[in-house]
């Protein structure tokens, strides 16, 4: 399973990268705004900065809502850096844009996917990743993890190469549930990833080893 960090925060990206387990980064316009990155040139520069920190794919989202704008933006984003993956929303124009961009050999991430039908269209259009937002489904009393399992089964059955990317992860348990549901990639804020480390028996075990070591030195 690949681990992406879902943030535009440089410190958190560096922290995850330093852990040695990071495979990529996803961003979206809300995450960029949260970091105070405004204006087209600053946004483009920020993507380049992220690409220089990590080695894997970095998703950069288009803002246009129509096909022409999406492909114009997508080609511009893709030309920024070889690690850039163009993130496109799952709309009619978005699917057309993914088909066009993937046909040009540009990696794409079909975002805001909430149903197996949307995921099917994304795969047929040749998306590299399909971003299914599990937390936002849970928010409306729908089952986000069940969607990951359904999409994974469908892609495996038909042999689609599109990778199932579980997004909108809110807590550590989501990550573990995504493992069981067959996600290829999780993209998560830093805290749920670090939460995987937590176990009271690890803490008490270290404490005991340290106190026994100190006793043996006396
Ligand atoms: O990757 C999508 C993610 O950023 C959305 O997360 O918590 O806003 O639903 P959230």
Image (tube, rainbow, N blue to C red):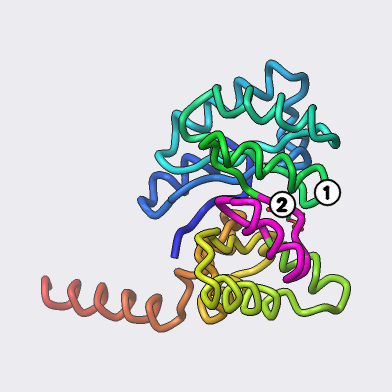
Q: Residue furthest top?
A: 41
The image shows residue 63 at horizontal and vertical percentages of: 79, 33
Which residue is label 2 attached to?
111
Q: Residue 140: name its quadrant.
A: bottom right
Span of residues in magenta: 110-131
The image shows residue 125 at horizontal and vertical percentages of: 65, 51
Please tell me whether mark 1 sits on a helix, a strand or a loop. helix
Q: Identify the residue at image location x=55%, y=22%.
A: 80
State yes or no: residue 22 in magenta.
Answer: no
Q: Is mark 1 within 8 Å of ligand 1?
A: no
Decide: is 47 above or below 116.
Answer: above
Which residue is label 1 attached to?
92
Q: Residue furthest left?
A: 217
Q: Quadrant of ligand 1?
A: bottom right
Foreground residue among 57 and 20: 57
Left or right for 108, reference 13:
right
């Amino acid at each position: 399973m690949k681990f992406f960090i879902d943030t535009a925060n440089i410190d958190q990206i560096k922290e995850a990268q330093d852990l040695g387990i990071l495979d990529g980064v996803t961003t979206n316009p809300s995450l960029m705004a949260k970091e105070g990155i405004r204006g087209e040139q600053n946004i483009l520069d920020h993507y380049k900065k992220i690409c220089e920190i990590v080695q894997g794919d970095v998703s950069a989202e288009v803002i246009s809502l129509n096909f022409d704008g999406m492909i114009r933006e997508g080609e511009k984003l893709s030309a920024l850096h070889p690690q850039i993956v163009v993130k496109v929303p799952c709309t009619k124009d978005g699917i057309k844009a993914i088909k066009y961009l993937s046909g040009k050999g540009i990696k794409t991430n079909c975002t805001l996917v909430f149903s197996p039908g949307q995921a099917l269209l994304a795969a047929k259009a040749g998306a590299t990743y399909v971003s299914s937002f599990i937390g936002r489904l849970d928010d409306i009393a729908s089952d986000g993890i069940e969607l990951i399992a359904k999409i994974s089964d469908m892609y495996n059955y038909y042999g689609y190469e599109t990778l199932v990317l579980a997004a909108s992860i809110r807590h550590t348990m989501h990550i573990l549930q995504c493992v069981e549901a067959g996600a290829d990639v999780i993209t998560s804020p830093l805290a749920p990833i670090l939460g995987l480390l937590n176990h009271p028996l690890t803490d008490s075990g270290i404490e005991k080893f340290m106190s026994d070591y100190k006793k043996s030195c006396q």
